[in-house]
């Protein structure tokens, strides 16, 4: 299933495929992802493949959006993911991002997220995008605020035992 390709100054963003299973295994086992997002318990390539099929590939088919693989254009290095998700308990699409630790702090998360928000507004015609974030994740909160999202409220997602912060950006109609 081919999806849109977004190009930024330094990145190419494209939909994930089963060939990106090793990247997703690395993302899901990044200590920061486990700390701030969740420990999905995905430890093998086979488990990651099943999760890609049940997650991103299903999102593309059902909603026409999902996470993009981030690839640095200068050397074809995979850096992480960024895209739109549709989570149980939220009424709108939400943006999520995970940059592998060796590439954090270099502006890739902002560059990718800005492109995803532009795509959500201009190509998908979404009226808004939300984001959920751990209240302790100061780096992600800073990124969301820099992108123009604003804090709305604390929410508890289904099957969670802790609250997360809900952020939102409305696009002009």
Image (cartoon, rainbow, N blue to C red):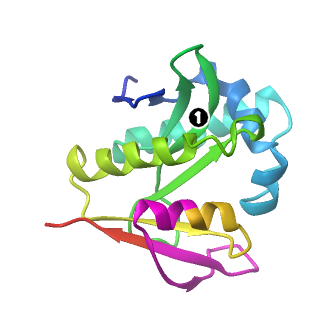
Q: Residue at the spot x=74%, y=73% of the render? A: 136
Find disc 1 in the rendering and name its residue.
53
Q: Quadrant of the C terminus?
A: bottom left
Element type at mark 1: helix
Q: Residue at the spot x=55%, y=59% of the render? A: 143
Compared with 24, 22 (above or below) is above
Q: Position of residue 118 (x, y in %)?
A: 30, 48
Q: Position of residue 104 (x, y in %)?
A: 69, 43
How many labels sit on residues? 1
Q: Residue at the spot x=71%, y=59% of the render? A: 37
Identify the residue at the far bottom of this view. 153
Residue 21 at least partly seen: yes
Q: Residue at the spot x=57%, y=43% of the render? A: 107
Between 143 and 80, the one nearer to me in the picture: 143
Between 57 and 128, the one nearer to me in the picture: 128
Give the magenta-colored segment's residue range.
143-167
Q: Position of residue 122 (x, y in %)?
A: 21, 47
Q: Quadrant of the N terminus?
A: top left
Q: Position of residue 151 (x, y in %)?
A: 49, 79
Between 65 and 146, the one nearer to me in the picture: 146
Q: Quadrant of residue 3?
A: top left
> Is residue 125 toward the left or the right of residue 153 in the image?
left
> Within the magenta stretch, is there residue 38?
no
> Is residue 129 toward the left or the right of residue 57 in the image?
left
Q: Quadrant of residue 52?
A: top right
> Within the magenta stretch, is there residue 145?
yes
């Amino acid at each position: 299933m081919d999806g849109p390709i977004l190009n930024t100054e330094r990145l190419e963003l494209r939909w994930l495929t089963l060939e990106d299973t090793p990247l997703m295994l690395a993302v899901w086992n990044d200590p920061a992802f486990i700390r701030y997002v969740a420990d999905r318990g995905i430890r093998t390539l086979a488990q990651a493949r099943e999760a890609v099929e049940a997650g991103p590939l299903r999102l593309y088919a059902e909603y026409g959006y999902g996470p993009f693989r981030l690839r640095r254009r200068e050397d074809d290095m995979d850096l992480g993911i960024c895209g739109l998700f549709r989570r149980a308990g939220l009424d709108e699409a939400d943006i999520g991002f995970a940059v592998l630790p060796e590439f954090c702090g270099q502006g890739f998360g902002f560059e990718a997220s800005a492109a995803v928000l532009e795509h959500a507004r201009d190509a998908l015609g979404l009226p808004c995008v939300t984001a959920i974030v751990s209240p302790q994740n100061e780096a992600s909160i800073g990124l969301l605020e820099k992108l123009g999202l604003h804090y709305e409220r604390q929410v508890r997602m289904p099957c969670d035992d802790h609250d997360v912060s809900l952020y939102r950006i409305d696009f002009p109609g």
